[in-house]
Structure formats: structure tokens, C-alpha cells
Image (spheres, rainbow, N blue to C red):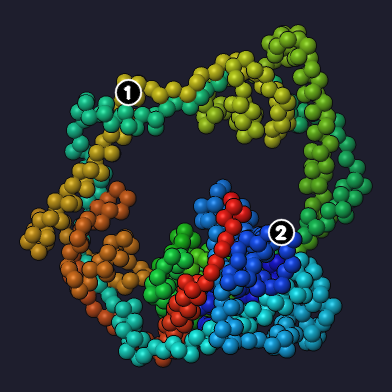
Amino acid sequence: MCIMLNILRKNAQSVIIQAIVVVIAVVFVFWGAGSKLKSDSTAIAVVNGKEIAYREFQQSYERAVESYKQQFGGQMPPGFLDSIGLKKQVLNQLIQSVLLLQGAEKIGVMVSKEATQKKIQEMPVFTNNGRFDLSNYKAVLERNRLSPTVFESGIQNDLLVTRVVEALGSFADISGKEVQSWINYADQEIKLAYTVFRSEDYTSQVKVVADELETWYETAKLNYKSPPQSKLQYLSFNYDDDLKQVVVSDEAVQQYYQENLSKYNAPEQRRARHILFRVTAEESPELKAAKKAEAEKVLSLVKNGTDFAKLASKYSEDSSKSNGGDLGFFSRGKMVQPFEDSVFSLKQGEVSGLVETPFGYHIIKIEEIKPEKTQSFEEVRGAIRKELEKQGVKAITFKRASTAYEDIIRAGSLAKYSAKSGIPVSRTEFFAQNNPPEDKVARDHAFLQAAFGLKKGELSSIVETGTGYAIIFVDDAKESVVPELAAVRERAIVDFKKFKSVDLASAAADNSLKAIQEKQNWPIQLERKESDYMQRVGPSGSIPDQVRQDAFAHVGRASFPEKVIAVDTSFYVYQIIDSRQSKEVMDTDKRRNLEQQLLAVQKNKLLADWLGQLRKEAKIWTNAQMLQ
């Protein structure tokens, strides 16, 4: 399905198509709505008499899951899909697609079979030496588990959507006044006077009163709960002790290399830097456009020769900014698709245009390329020998551990086995799972998991560790307990002061703001700092983004905030001391690009309104039980 998604991505670069993707991603990601799938199961929904088969829904859902897996690098957080209501999202998108197709028919928009065939024949993935190849076409569809009927229906729907958007978009219009208004909005700058009340500055003012401390501790005592502890006896059987018994021939090493050549093939890797302008799906179209305009300004600086790493350190909105945007080396399959496609299409030293992903807008620079390489036999001979020795020694060490385990069972206890065999048993004092002894075996993750899964007096089975095997006996165990305040008093007092200092800082900020609002000026005794001029997006210096956004919301209405702005355990009060338009003049290309963006937003809104009306007038039935 990745190939098929790439086909769609390559055919979705226009402003119109990008706009429609925002509203109904189903057309390009959840492909198949309106296709002539024959279902052998009950319909999950009926839209104006048109059934949406459960099979169709299931295929769309699976593709959506796969798309999210790619975004998360193959491992999604537990419960993520349920938390975002993915099943309902997919069904709504399928319903929306059916409505769009029905609406297109109402307004007389159609796509002929000839137009569909022409579109498919022009797709590079199906061509051979520049000409459409029918056998290649069938092979690609088969690899992606798609029938020609479903695929051609999807392409027809794609073309139909494009024509509907074009038809509706013909009513969209952006005046010069609107463009200038937006330029003024995006280029507005403000300067603040501000002060910050940090909770740590008030810790020394907190008075510890016994009654208050006890009351607070009742609400926080679970934070002081001691973890379970165990006292163990164990035997360890290490691979290293048996390695001398393993003989690996040169022929075996050579054979392993030949049979596992792919294991020693290092794929092409690229080292890239990027500058990220973070935009989430929930952001308003205005803020998205502002972010994109900011990204384009920085891109022009890159194109004009400004140091990329310095720009990344200043503008990038992710953790890589501290390293000049450096992402290190990575191969295909490690990044989200649009980012990866751009990285692997550039040459060393080249810089991309703006690349949009679910995280926002990226500017990418390729620093270094490591070509694909297969390691020679000589390079990996030693590693293969060690791997074969490890494989061979496992059986020997396991047999030794297994024999000992049987003898322990016959002896009746680990202690009796030790006394009879003369083999010493390792012992620990009480310890918690998150604070194990220094012994390497006892610190092994599998060892700890097994040990803390046992009760007092229980013997484990044979446990495989990173260095061999172990047999564990729980000599004694302590349950998790919540201590009395007296036992943790000093620690509790420190935490209590931190907790109360937040209240004091908040109260001090509230009182200062009230005084400012009453007198409408800055008190002489209150510390006053000044920020640099800043815009809605981009660098804000020492001003947190929460403060900046609140201040822009008050421009033209008030100089002071309505309430104190809390940022973690600090509290900000500010005054807008100046507001002006940026001195930079937008060039012709940027202005034209902005006009296209605003026009795309207008077309997007027209389509959303039209679809909303179709949905309002439609007769829709859904089978809620199938979504459980």
C-alpha cells in the first residue's frame, strides 16, 4: 500500500488538491469510497440509499492504522487509536466521500472512463521505457492487494473530486484588501514590558505549620509509598564459562555469511539537518498560513547563504535546534513519508523547499550521504564467529542450568542443593526493583522481572538473562507501604515548601496585576524587563509562547492582561508598550504565494460548507454495533 500512497502523493501537489486533502483525506488515504466492492457482510452505513459495506470500512480502517504506524515509526502508544476515535473518523470520511460523489452527480460533474484510463497511463509507476506497461500495471496492483476495478474507481473518484473542487473554487475570490489585511496581521510586531514571579523565589517565605503539613501529607502520601523489596538467593550459569567447549569451523563461518548476506547489507544512509515550524491539525488556517509565511522567510535566508545550522538553532521548534537541526544518519523507513521522500530525492549539500508533514513545515539540508554497502567476509568474520559461538554455547549452558534445577528439586531447596553440591549461592540484602545490587546478573532486566514476580519462599523456573541463565529463590519479601509522616518528614517538608511556594508566587502575581489594572501604569517597586519586538510566530526571546499569544489577543483592546499568565510554576504579568508593522516589505513572489494560500483556504471553506449542507440534507443510517 506504500507504493499506492506514493502514487497519490505525487498527484496531490497542487494548491487545490492540498486544500481538499485537509477536508476529506479519505480521497487520498482512505481509498475506495464509492468503488464497486461486492460485500458478503452487512452494510455498516447507508447514505441516501447507497450502502457502505463493512468490508470497505475494514480495508479503509486498516490503511489508516498503517498510516499512523508509519508516523510513529512502527510502534503506536497503547490505546492511541481508541483515544482519537479512529473507527468513527474512518466511517465519517467514507460517508463524506459518498456524499461528495452524490453531490457531484447532482451538479452535473462527471468523469469519463477515457479520462480515467488516460490518468492511469500517465502514472510513471506503471510505465516501462516511457510507455504504459499493462503487465507492470497488474503486478503493482497485485502487490498492493488491489483489483483493477477498485483502483480505477479510486482514480475516477480522485478526478471527480478535483473537478468538483475546481467547480466550487471558481466562486472563490480574494481581494487585494483581504491580502493586505492578512499581511498586516502576519507582520504585526509588539514589544512588551514584563515581570515574572517564579515559585522557587518564594520557597524561603513558606512557613511550615504542623497542622497544614499533616493535611497536605494526607493528599500527597501516595507519592512516598515505598516500593516492594525482595531478598534473594540465586545461582547463575554464564555463557563465558562454557565457551571453550564450543568449536566453530572456518567452513561454518563462511556458510553463515553466504546464507545471511542481507544481514550485512547496510542500506543507504543520509545525514540531514532540518528547521521545523510546528503546526498541528488543530491550528486555525490563519495560524497555519502565518507559520508557512515565516518558514518561507527563513527559506529565503537559507537560499541567500545564511548558515543553516545557525538558522536552525534560532528558528526550529523541536529538540534538534540545540544541535543546529542535526538529525544524524538515518535510512529509509525511519521518518514520516513526505520528509523521507524529500531527503532521499536531494543531493549532498542541497536544500529542500518547504516540506509539509503532520508535524508542520520543514526546511531540510542534506549534509552527508553514505551509499548502500555490503560488508565483506573479512570485515565480519570475527563477529560471525562470536555469533556462532554464542549460539553453540547456549545449549551447553542451558543443559548445565537444567541439570542443576533438577538437582535442586530433588534436594528440596536451593540451600540443601548448595550444601550437598558445594556450589555457592549468591545472596542479596533487601532491595527494590528500581535499585538493584551492583552484581551484573542481578541487574539484568529479565532477572528482575522474574524475581519480582515471585512471592516469599517461591523458586523461579530457569531464567534466561543477557549473559546466561539463572535460578532464583525469594528468601524474604517486604510489601509496598505508605510511611507515616514522621518517617519522611524532612523530605515531605521540602516538597511541601515547593507546593506552597507556587501559591505564594501566584498570589503575588495576582496582587501586582490588580494594582496595575487599578492605576493603569507599572508600579515603581515592581521589576520591569523589556522584550525585543516579536511577531505572532517565530522567535520570541525570553517570552514564553503562552504570554506572546495572550498579548497579541489584547492588541488594540488593552495594554495589560485580564489575568496572570501561568507557565509551569512561574507567573507572568505584562504590558504592551508598542505595536507596529514589520519594516520588511513582502516581495512579489511571496505576496503571490500568500494569495494562493488564502485562495486555497477560501476554496476549502466553500467545499466544507457544501459538504456540510449535503450532510444536513442526507438520510444517513449507521450500524453503531459494528464500531464497537
- Determine whether, in the image, residue 280 is placed left or right of residue 46: left
- Determine whether, in the image, residue 27 is placed left or right of residue 541: right
Q: What's the residue at 83%, 57% (across, down)?
A: 261
Tell me, yes or no, whether the two marked residues, 2 and 1, touch with CB atoms within 8 Å: no
Q: Secondary structure at mark 2?
A: loop
- Mark 2 nearby-residue class (10 Å; few <14, some 14–19, many ≥20): few
Q: CA distance from mark 2 to mark 1?
A: 63 Å
| Residue 425 visible in the current orientation | yes
- Where's residue 475, x and y in %? 60, 15
Residue 294 sits above or below residue 266 on the image: below
Q: What's the residue at 79%, 43% (across, down)?
A: 387
- 179 vs 593, nearest the viewer: 179
- Mark 1 nearby-residue class (10 Å; few <14, some 14–19, many ≥20): some
Q: Quadrant of residue 466?
A: top right
Q: Earlier in the sequence, mark 2 or mark 1?
A: 2
Q: Secondary structure at mark 1?
A: helix
Residue 119 sits above or below residue 324 on the image: below
For badge 1, the amino acid type reads Leu
Q: Quadrant of residue 576?
A: bottom left
- Where's residue 551, x and y in %? 25, 66
Residue 41 is labelled as 2
Which of label 2 and label 1 is nearer to you? 2
For badge 2, the amino acid type reads Ser
- 295 vs 98, nearest the viewer: 98
Give the labeled residue for mark 1. 485
- Where's residue 357, x and y in %? 54, 69
- Determine whether, in the image, residue 252 is placed left or right of residue 462: right
- Where's residue 459, x and y in %? 67, 19
